[in-house]
Amino acid sequence: IQLSPLSPYSGTYVGYLIEKGKLNIGLEYLVENGRLTASNKLFLDQFTFGEAVESDRSTSLPVRLAVALLKDRNGEIHLDIPVSGDLDDPQFSILGIIWQVIRNLLVKAATSPLALISAMAGGEDFSTIVFPYGSARLAPPEQAKLEKIAGVLRDRPELKLEVKGYVDPERDPEGYRRELLQSRIRRAKYLDLVKRQGEAAPADAGTVTVTAAEYPEYLWRIYKETDFPKPRTVVGLVKHLPDAELEKLLLANTRAGAEELAELARARAEAVATALVETGGIPRERVFLATAEITALPADRDASRSRVEFGMAVR
C-alpha cells in the first residue's frame, strides 16, 4: 500500500502529512471452535512524515520519535502483532487490540525510549548507566552497554540523545569522599613518576596503581598536606596515626555537599557523552547534556540512584 495518498487522514489524526512510504501486511488467521489465533506482520518501508498540520483531532503522542526509534538503518520498520481471543466475546476487538499495541509503542517512545529499544534488541536494559558510589568512572560492563547504545544510534541517524546525570544523596557523599582521597593518592604517585621518569611516565594519574606497600607513605603525605586541625605531639608536630585513623580524619574533613554532588552528576553525564562520541563514533552534535533534578528517584525504585539516564528526540 502506498502511504502518501493517506496524508489527509494522517494530518487529521496524527498531526503530520506523509511524505513517502509503503506498507506491506502479512496476515495469518486461524479460527478453531470460535477462538481466533492471528499474526499481523507489518512492514513499513521508508515511512517518512512530512510537514506538521494543525488539527484538534490529532494525537499528542510522539509519533515522529516512535517512527525514528522503530526504523532500522535501512529505513525499515518491522512489527509482528499477535492477536488471540474468543470471537463470541462482545468485548473482543481485533482492531482494538492492534491499536492498543501500537499506542503502547508510542507511549513507550515518549516515556522511556531506551527501554523500547531494549525490548527490540532482546531485552537488555539500555535505559540507565550505573556508576560506583561517588565515582564518575565507567565500569567495563557499562562501557560495553554504551557500545551497544552507540550502535543503536548509528543505525538510527534521525535520533539525538539527551544525557542526564544523577546522584544518590545517601550513598554518594561517602563514596565521593573515598574516591577523592584515592584520586589524590594516585596523583601524588603520578607526580613522583613524572619527576623520575619524565616522558616515560604514565599519560595521566588515572592509570597509576598504588601498591599496598606504597599506600601508607602516600596516605601520610596527603594527610600532612591537607589543611584541617590535626592531633599533634607535645612539641607541636603533626602526630603520625595508624592508617585507618588517617583515612577517617581525611574523609571527615572532605566536603561532599550539594555543590560537589552536582559536579559529580555533571561528570557522570560528561563521561557517558564522551564515551559515545570518542569510542562510539557518534557525532557530538547528536549528544546533549541535559539538566535534571539530580536526586530524583529512578522509575524502577529498586534501581541504583547513582546513574545516568537518557532522553531522545528527533533531529
Image (cartoon, rainbow, N blue to C red):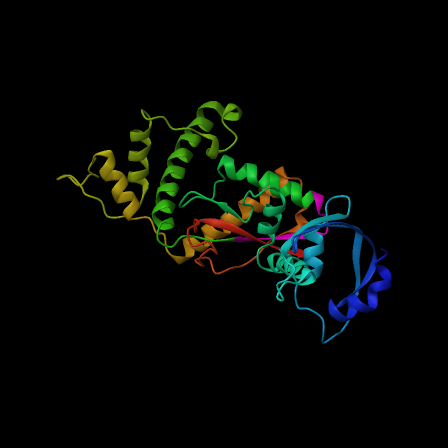
Please identify the residue farthest to the front as the structure is shown. Answer: 33
* Residue segment shown in magenta: 155-164
Question: Along the horizontal axis of the image, is 226 left or right of 92?
Answer: left
**Residue closer to the observer: 119 or 295:** 119
Rendered location of residue 211, percent (x, y): 36, 26
Decide: is 198 above or below 82. Answer: above
Please identify the residue farthest to the left as the structure is shown. Answer: 234
**Magenta stretch: residue 14 in it?**
no
The mark total stands at 0
Q: Quadrant of the C terminus?
A: bottom right
**Residue closer to the observer: 58 or 273:** 58
Question: Along the horizontal axis of the image, is 308 left or right of 250?
Answer: right
Residue 301 lies in what quarter of the image?
bottom left
* Residue at the image position 71 percent from the left and 71 percent from the top: 58
Rendered location of residue 258, percent (x, y): 40, 58
* Residue at the image position 61 percent from the left and 51 percent from the top: 116
Q: Is residue 131 visible?
A: yes
Decide: is 113 above or below 73. Answer: below
- The secondary structure that most of the magenta stretch takes on is strand
Rendered location of residue 201, percent (x, y): 49, 26
**Magenta stretch: residue 163 in it?**
yes
Q: Is residue 52 visible?
A: no
Q: Quadrant of the N terminus?
A: bottom right
Question: Along the horizontal axis of the image, is 255 left or right of 143?
Answer: left
**Residue closer to the observer: 131 or 209:** 131
Rendered location of residue 234, percent (x, y): 12, 40
